[in-house]
Amino acid sequence: MTEDLRQLKAIIEALIFVADEPISAPQLAAVLADHDRDLVVTAVSELVEEFNARQSGLEIRLIAGGYRLSTRPEFHEQIRTYLRSRPSAKLPLASLETLAVVAYKQPITLPEIQELRGVSSVSSIRTLLERGLIVPRGRKQVVGRPIMYGTSKDFLIQFGLADLSDLPSMEDFEELVAG
């Protein structure tokens, strides 16, 4: 491996580490515009492979269309134990239910959410909007033109999903409840 490629990988690793959000290969290439774009893409792929082969406590994952440093799934139980020992900002059950409805039925309006849940969801929508887990996705072309909601990039990040296809299927939930 050339010294240039080794240094490029180190720079990319540092960029992934400091990025507030997952950083995509095109974003990395734009930041590293003084390097050949194909070399940057190659360096990213090699870095992810080498980093993840180390079997350390961290890995580089593709989440929400970009790369992010995250903990390995096999250590999640220990991490959960640690995090439970700290005060947290949990979502109320009503907000979690509303978030699930939005995630699976988006784009969806407040009246549609309330019809599915059978209860008022105004405060839950407000909470989810404040936390950045959902965003307005335009207005439905019906009488009253209600706002349609969908999940945000922060939703994908918070739940460690590459995209919405990573959500568990309804069949998975049925198996969990039945088993």
Image (tube, rainbow, N blue to C red):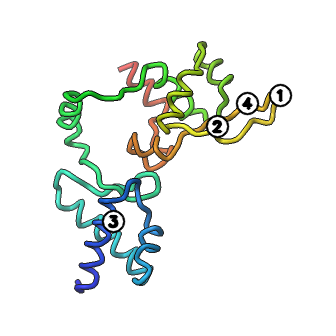
| Residue 15 numbered mark, or none | 3
Q: Earlier in the sequence, mark 2 or mark 3?
A: 3
Q: Earlier in the sequence, mark 3 or mark 1?
A: 3
| Residue 146 numbered mark, or none | 4
Above/below status of 98 relative to 26: above
Instruction: Give whichever of 120, 172 is nearer the camera.
Output: 120
Q: How far apart are the two marked residues, 4 and 2, measured between alpha carbons?
A: 11 Å
> Residue 111 appears at what percent x and percent y?
68, 22
> Residue 67 appears at what percent x and percent y?
38, 59
> Residue 119 appears at what percent x and percent y?
59, 13
| Residue 107 numbered mark, or none | 2
Which amino acid is tagged 1?
A: Val
Which label sits in the foreground, 4 or 2?
A: 4
- SS of the residue under disc 1: loop
Q: How far apart are the two marked residues, 4 and 3, measured between alpha carbons?
A: 40 Å
Q: How far apart are the two marked residues, 2 and 1, measured between alpha carbons?
A: 17 Å
The quarter of the picture where the N terminus appears is bottom left
Q: Earlier in the sequence, mark 4 or mark 3?
A: 3
Which amino acid is tagged 4?
A: Pro
Which amino acid is tagged 3?
A: Leu
Above/below status of 162 relative to 92: below
- SS of the residue under disc 2: loop
Q: Which residue is located at x 32 percent, y 59 percent?
A: 18
Q: Which residue is located at x 50 percent, y 28 percent?
A: 127
Relative placement, left or right, of 115 versus 98 is: right
Q: Earlier in the sequence, mark 2 or mark 1?
A: 2
Q: Which residue is located at x 49 percent, y 47 percent?
A: 153
Above/below status of 90 relative to 37: above
Which label sits in the foreground, 2 or 1?
A: 1
Residue occupied by mark 1: 143
